[in-house]
Amino acid sequence: MKAALPVAMLVGALAVPSLASARQVSFETQMSNYGGDGAYVALYLTDNAGRYQRTLWVAGPKAKYHKNLRDWYRAAGGTAKVDGISGASVGAGKTLRVTLDLADTLIDAGYQVHIDTAVEDMKAYPSEVVVPLTRSGVNKPVSGNGYVKSFRYAL
């Protein structure tokens, strides 16, 4: 019983730095008025060598259409398992806003945010947006080359 308090204090002391090393990052993807159904959108991270690291968010609930988000689907190993990190598709002219906790070590470390988009019966845009995750890129809008009118993130 006497050892329980020092052990609990040690565990707490070790846990606090890991909690402090994460921050909320907000991602905002504004869609253009492309004139079609709701877009499926995948936001994901790659490292400085371009290797897939993590799915941040997938907009579009039907797993059978996730394969149309080609770069993300291939990089994630051909799996559409996105429980807890997915939501509805995004309509033309609408804005997708997602806020997540990300480790501070991902910022200014060569990581890139990718956005793949696809719309039923229309063209898919793999890696439509690719932007480095840096402090200098905060709140700077980036245009997509398909359905994304603009993308920005905030720390």
Image (spheres, grey):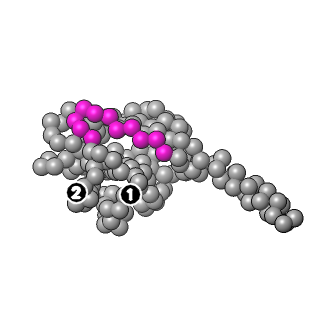
From the top left corner, tell me how far across and down residue 88 is, in percent.
Answer: 29, 45
Magenta stretch holds residue 92: yes
Residue under label 2, please give it.
65
From the top left corner, tell me how far across and down residue 111 is, in percent.
Answer: 48, 51
Q: Nearer the viewer, mark 1 or mark 2?
A: 1
Q: What SS does tag 1 mark?
A: loop
Report, in whole angstroms, how far the alpha carbon at label 1 lies from the one at label 2: 15 Å
The disc at residue 4 is none
Residue under label 1, please give it.
83
How packed mark 2 is, by other alpha carbons closer than 10 Å (few <14, some 14-19, many 20 or more), is some
From the top left corner, tell me how far across and down residue 117 is, in percent.
Answer: 27, 48
User: On screen, 101 above or below 96?
Assistant: below
Residues 74 and 19: in front is: 19
Mark 1 near mark 2, Cβ–Cβ under 8 Å? no
Q: Classify residue 4 as left or right of residue 113.
A: right
Q: Amino acid at mark 2?
A: Tyr
Please identify the quarter of the rendering in which residue 15 is found. Answer: bottom right
The image quadrant where one finds the N terminus is bottom right
Q: Residue at x 41, y 44 (%)?
A: 131
Q: What SS does tag 2 mark?
A: helix
Q: Residue at x 65, y 53 (%)?
A: 18
Number of numbered markers: 2
Q: Amino acid at mark 1?
A: Asp
Q: Classify residue 111 as left or right of residue 69.
A: right
Is residue 146 something that shows in the picture?
no
The part of the chain drawn in magenta is 90-100
Q: Classify residue 109 as left or right of residue 139.
A: right
